[in-house]
Image: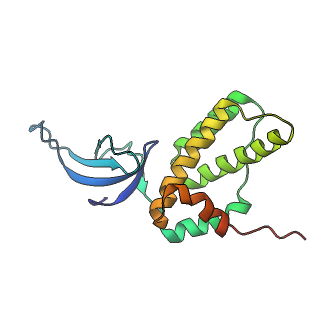
Amino acid sequence: MFKVNDYVVYGMTGVCQISAIGKDEYDKDNDTQYYVLTPVFSSNMTIRVPVNSKKLHMRPVMTKKEVLALIASMPEQETLWTDDDRQRAASFQTALRSGKSEEWIKLIKTLHTEKEYRSSIGKKLTKTDEDLMNNAERQLNQEFAIALGIDPEEVLDFILEHVPKKVEA
């Protein structure tokens, strides 16, 4: 069970802070406990999620140690490219919705690799691929920012500083 002030990753909303845990103040007959979530990087809403929900797509934010280990593993992360646009979009949507940072990294790495290749031949990513990459980067940057105690805009530079460089044989 989470506690008040814990940071969590909630579905596609991104990083949220638990601002309260309690019953619905407007429905006195309902004994259900709710987490009240406040998105950290967009303060224009709150979300109420039943504590005992079986479909709870919420997990704790990674620790700094976990983030550093994940950054260290980035060069070995596989890519997921599929030439079929529909199949690729479905696969990438599944990876994005998984809520797993490892899946977001695979998606981002795959699309950055494809973006570089297409740029070299004078082409661009499709709008769908670009949107998926941006969403995955937003999710990852938010989580890494909280874990590392930096701004989301600083995450890419942090990763580039800390990702192991491949050694050519």
The quadrant where residue 50 appears:
top left
Residue under the image location 73 percent in, 49 percent down: 79
Residue 86 percent location from the top left of the image: 68, 28
Furthest residue to the left?
28
Residue 1 horizontal side relative to residue 162, left or right: left
Q: Quadrant of the N terminus?
A: bottom left
The relative height of residue 49 versus residue 125 in the rendered view (above or below) is below
Could you say which is closer to the camera, residue 1 or residue 75? 75
The quadrant where residue 31 appears:
top left
Q: Is residue 142 visible?
A: yes
Q: Quadrant of the C terminus?
A: bottom right
Could you say which is closer to the camera, residue 93 or residue 53? 93
Q: How many marks?
A: 0
The relative height of residue 163 versus residue 42 in the rendered view (above or below) is below
Residue 28 horizontal side relative to residue 72, left or right: left
Residue under the image location 72 percent in, 29 percent down: 85
Residue 71 percent location from the top left of the image: 63, 64
Residue 62 percent location from the top left of the image: 48, 62
Residue 74 percent location from the top left of the image: 68, 61
Name the colour scheme.
rainbow
Q: Is residue 51 visible?
A: no
Furthest residue to the right?
169
Residue 159 horizontal side relative to residue 17, left or right: right
